[in-house]
Image (tube, rainbow, N blue to C red):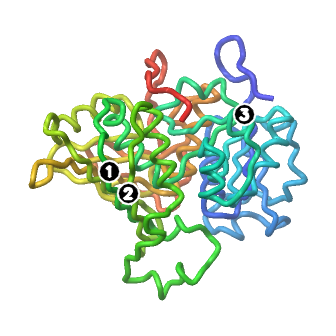
Amino acid sequence: MYTMNGSGGAASPPRVAVVGATGYVGAELCRLLWDHPLVELVFAGSSSAAGRSLDEVSPGAPPIDLRHFEELPANEIDLAFLALPAGASGAIAARLLEAGSRVVDMSGDHRLRDPGLHERVYGTVRNEQLVTDAVYGISEYVRALLPECRFIANPGCYPTSVALALGPLARRLLLRRPVVVHSQSGVSGAGRSPSEGTHFCRVDEDARPYKIGCHRHAPEMEQFLASLDPEHSAEVIFTPQLVPLRRGLISTMVVPTDGTWDAMEARRLLMDRYGDEPFVDVLEAGRTSSIHEVVGTSSCCISVHDSQRGDHVLLVSAIDNLLKGAAGQAVQNMNIAFGLEETSGLPRRTRGQRVRRHDRPHGNAAGTRSESGRELHPEASRA
């Protein structure tokens, strides 16, 4: 199993596994981990395609043999990513944790801490001990917890875009009235399994809201914001839309103000909070975030705007739903947990320039920014 040697380096690279490797998120994880310079991808699991090579099932993915989960040598794995449908990860996570592996769960099974709320939202019963042990992994807010953490509940794509934009405002107790969030996501956010709603003829040249007022990511957003402002439960009115893009996600947030702060103050708060963050970029006044700024990277790009009436501030947050919204954030959490370079194996936006685009990212496009001596943020908390 993975250990650090006396000089602070790894005695051997961490051995990692992906369970559910043929979905969009699982395949993206395999691409990143295959090219990661500091870890070894030793297992890719699929119940539907075992015996085949991943690149046959997902063009552009690495040529790793797919195997049944039952073949996973749990006691030889340092960390496993579970990219499984809702309700499927609990038993597998428990087995891996018992064998000594760390686990990153990509599903929503262990994100919501309230068991009653989880059952209402997801319609499933789960192992509550796993939830107690889990850290909700918005990387920038739980960095101090990850080295000792064994179970990470990786956030959803929509909540990631919203949490990063609103987190600094919640921390300063500025979210005292309901926040309206409109988000648009590419079709890959709906998963690989085809449905009538994701058929080309339904999606092309259209933008369609769905799960209006009842999307399962809204409580996740509210839970995160409440973790930063425990005295006030922020209300999020959330409407997602499916748009005819392969990948990418953009959220627009309308935040009421009380007259004591405006877009300039909000932008200053975000810049102060994220100035040293490798994967969060706050744009200067006059610029607007867009999906083209971030697609193919694990960066989040945020812009801040005043309303014409002056009583609201608008924030626009863009991410790649498969990278910062899923696989990229999971690898970032893994890097931090193992004490690796945080940016290792992850493509990111070049600040002040157009994005380095990779429609099929292959990992090590990151810079060499050192994390040594970096102050841990006080917001680190279990969400």
Residue at (42% x, 44% y) in the render: 163
Q: Mark 3 falls on what kind of element? A: loop
Which residue type carries mark 1?
Val
Disc 1/disc 2 C-alpha distance (Å): 6 Å
Residue 382, given in percent of the width and then of the height, sits at 56, 31
Is residue 174 positioned above or below 178 on the image?
Answer: above
For label 3, count other residues whose C-alpha is less than 10 Å away and answer few (under 14), some (14-19) or many (20+).
many
Residue 237 marker = 2
Mark 2 or mark 3, earlier in chain:
3
Q: Mark 1 falls on what kind of element? A: strand
Disc 2/disc 3 C-alpha distance (Å): 41 Å
Seen as rendered, the residue at the extreme top is: 6
Residue 71, given in percent of the width and then of the height, sits at 90, 52
Which residue type carries mark 2?
Ile
For label 2, count other residues whose C-alpha is less than 10 Å away and answer few (under 14), some (14-19) or many (20+).
some
* Depth check, front residue: 240 or 360: 240
Mark 1 or mark 2, earlier in chain:
1
Which residue type carries mark 3?
Pro
Residue at (52% x, 64% y) in the render: 189
* Depth check, front residue: 8 or 79: 79
Is residue 62 positioned above or below 202 on the image?
Answer: above
